[in-house]
Image: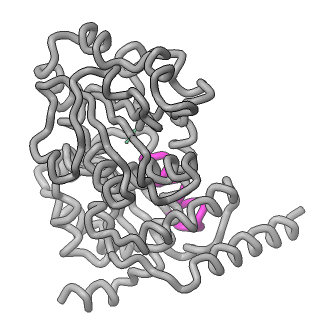
Amino acid sequence: MASMKTDMTADIEKNLEKTRDGRDLSVLDLYSIDPLTHEDLSLIFDLAPLFRAAKTEKLTLCRGKTQINGFFESSTRTMASFDLSGKHLGMDTTNVGGGSSMSKGEGYLDTVMTLDAYNPAVIVMRTRQSGVQEMVARHVNAAIINAGDGWHEHPTQGLLDALTLSEHFGDIDMTGRIITVVGDVMHSRVFGSLVRVLTKLNATIRIVCPQTMKPIGLEKYGCTVFYDLAEGVTGAHAIYALRVQEERGAKGHIPTLREYSKLFGIKPSHLAIAAKDAIVMHPGPVRREVDMAPELAARHPQSRILRQVENGMAVRKAILWLLSTRCDGRQKESVRL
Ligand code: CP
């Protein structure tokens, strides 16, 4: 049994190396979707299905490397997914949060430089504030991966969402596909990354939100904004619901959650007017009865919410492998100096 597993691991890794074909990402860190090229997206989307098929197989691709997960804001799926992904790749992983030096007055830069002194290949970071990951990336040798920064971006979420959509459409190019994003776009870093990646893939993006939640600067992404949910989902190929982000002050932008849910909660009647076989997505955590009707969450045949979670592991494994094996300290330093 043990030797069979070794053979299986070897076959999976051979296939991954063959598919990678010596390719690297064009970036040393992942703090935004912005700098990613089409080649980067293709590379991630080529590798992710192989990682998904490998499931929990213990690989050796990153053996001997260290991954530090710094979640300075709470998380369930992203933290579990990064931690398990690193372990499945053979990395030593450890988790730190906001409970120690940050609460004693140390800033992000000193905290991350301290963690970098342990020589990790990768530091994964979630922060309440925007822009921290980009700032610290300039000062450390480890590859910095943004697991969500304030209201700004959540790049691995955007990538797993794009993978889920491209799987459903059967094509990475989304020309002619309508994706309707519903809800609290104003406070959503998930939307921040989703809109960037979908624009790169030529999707048609519709937004449905209360007038008081319309973010500034949507025009540059060519999004069409609707204030009526039925209008916005008519003919859509995917409906992507967002959570009302109370922790970022969203309740100050709506009358009550009950009224919000009546006007902007996704219901089965909305799927009936969307395109045939349209899918429903949500980044989680889902607020049933607020963001969507309970019957649409998770197990509905047109829901892809749990597939998004699965794809999160696959995408994160691809990114961890690519960045940890591209970015040995010297290489990053020589680029930066
Ligand atoms: N989608 C997402 O970021 O979920 P968590 O907050 O649980 O990580």
| Residue 258 percent across, percent down from the top left | 28, 8
Ligand 1 quarter of the rendering:
top left
Quadrant in the rendering for residue 262:
top left
Instruction: Indicate left or right for 249 with 26 as reference.
Output: left
**Going 22% across and 52% down the picture, which residue do you hit?**
221
Q: Is residue 21 above or below residue 80?
A: below
Q: Seen from this angle, which residue lies furthest right?
A: 1
**Going 30% across and 19% down the picture, which residue do you hit?**
264
Magenta region: 78-92
**Residue 90 or 163: which is nearer the viewer?**
163
Q: Quadrant of the C terminus?
A: bottom left
| Residue 177 percent across, percent down from the top left | 43, 46
**Residue 76 or 150: which is nearer the viewer?**
150
Residue 241: in magenta span: no
**Going 16% across and 17% down the picture, which residue do you hit?**
254
Q: Quadrant of the N terminus?
A: bottom right
The answer to whether residue 77 is visible is yes
Quadrant in the rendering for residue 287:
top left
**Going 12% across and 22% down the picture, which residue do you hit?**
253
The answer to whether residue 320 is visible is no
Residue 88: in magenta span: yes
| Residue 29 percent across, percent down from the top left | 32, 70
**Residue 143 or 18: which is nearer the viewer?**
18
